[in-house]
Amino acid sequence: MIIRTKMGRLTVALLLLALLCAACVPLAPQPEVFTVLDPLKHADVEWEAQVVSHASGQCISPGGEYFLAALRTAGDETMTALPLDLAEGGVPLHSVPTSWSRYNRTEWFPVGWRGDTSCAFVLYGWQYSGPNQGERGAAIFVGDTLSGEPRQVGWMPIPDATESITGIYLEDSRFLRVGTDARLWEVDLHTETTRLVADGLPNYGGIAQTRLSPHCDYAAYSVYEEAGRQGVYALDVATGTEVALMPTTPESMGFYPTWSPDGTHLFLYTAHTSASSGYDTLPGEDGPLAAASVLTVMTPDGAMARTVALPEQYIFHASWLGDSTSIIFLSGEVVLGTWGEVRSIDYTGVWVAAASGDSEPTKVADFGDLLTGGSPPLWVYPVASLPDGSGAFYQLVRDDSSEIWRVSISGSATHITDGYWANPRLSPAYLDSVATVIVSGDRTALWMMGPDRCFEVDQLPQGADVLGFDEEYLIMSTSYFGESASTVAIWRMLGESMME
């Protein structure tokens, strides 16, 4: 039996009223979480082994548990899956005797990961064991951190000891593309088949090498000595189709093709002839300088996006900005000698040009802005671009000093620090900044370089360089010459910040 009273009904009414009032009270605003640049050393260890593998942006496993590196002890060299926290252990995947590797100059390349536990790597040189024992070339392996058992899934015969690997990229955890000075391959890691895409690519002693796109899906190269086939060409790795980007003619020639960071475009320095002279290239020590009166921007299928030129001036040291939509370059006036030699170069400014359309180049800095407080530089060249395309960094080398400058597309040139940018070919990006090693006298340091803020993160041992990286982590290593020892440090580059 249910007993209803006036007091009971009143209590229920009051409870309902309280609930309604609570629902009407506005909730406190939740703080917004931002990802910010906040380098923090994640791990640091000294090993009784040298790190001997090439640097890679694909060596860290997707879950952030392992990274691939080859370690050398007095007895063996071993490709190893190492824990990212640098704790004891690691999973050895494949080994060769150190004495064999040193004598035969084998090289290790971490390729990437096919999942959280499955990885791929390359051993290049004379093979100590396996199905191609005693042969010279590149052996493709897959391994697993659970079993530690590697399996060779591909072979690329490279008998010429002077032929070096120039590019490696793993796409979609399946298609491995490998380029050398003279050849291109593609390996399907699922079907374990190897396809030779191109053989006999032109190589003129390092003066005009084949240049692979960032994902190794295209190759661009110059042909000089074949009758009826001279100029700059692009090769599609997927189809094997070759396209003439700029055939050499009596009126013009292209050289030094340079890929955009996203691989969708490339520019060529372009020289023209006049009635009184040959091509207007500027002679350097081993070939033409990276300079021309015109830049030609193209897509790899042969379509021309635009040309860039300045009246009465040469374009020097052109470089893509990080967003792949613009090109930054120096301008200068040249005085030639009697025999066409370069007597002097008077740099005049830093310019930015869009990669497509017909807009005029924009001058973003007078070269005099970069001469403050010192003698004229002997060398000026770009070393890195900001990821968002807002500017680039330049190395200035003077008689008595070397400096790093940032040039912004908004129109400013800023001296950042003294020293040398250690590795212009490798500048991992984190948000709007790039990481680099700066060497100044006896001091070696890790720096972050951004559009608004550049700062030293930490001092490093001399000889430190990038070993691996991804969107969150940076791995640095230092090996000591003549010793089986190395130092490895890992930074977690990103953090979180909350705003009310």
Image (cartoon, grey):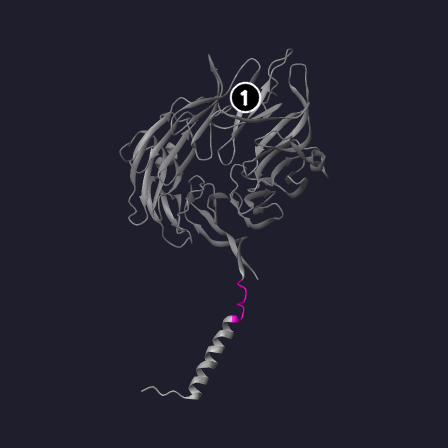
Q: Is residue 27 magenta?
A: yes
Circle 1 — which element?
strand
Q: Residue at x 61, y 45 (%)?
A: 451
Q: Identity of the amino acid at label 1?
A: Gly
Q: Residue furthest top?
A: 275
- Residue 487 placed where, x, y %? 47, 48
Regarding residue 98, the answer to whether it shows in the image is: no
Task: Give, as a single range, the part of the protein colored magenta.
Answer: 24-30
Q: Residues within 10 Å of mark 1 (few under 14, many from 20)?
A: many
Q: Is residue 316 above or below residue 497?
A: above
Q: Residue at x 61, y 29 (%)?
A: 358
Q: Residue at x 40, y 55 (%)?
A: 87
Residue 290 found in image quarter: top right
Regarding residue 196, the answer to whether it shows in the image is: yes
- Residue 36 placed where, x, y %? 54, 53
Please name whichever residue, 247 or 437, is drawn nearer the observer in this view of the structure: 247
- Residue 204 placed where, x, y %? 48, 21
- The majority secondary structure of the magenta stretch comes to loop
Q: Residue furthest left?
A: 131
Q: Is residue 197 magenta?
A: no
- Residue 269 placed where, x, y %? 57, 24
Mark 1 lies on residue? 254
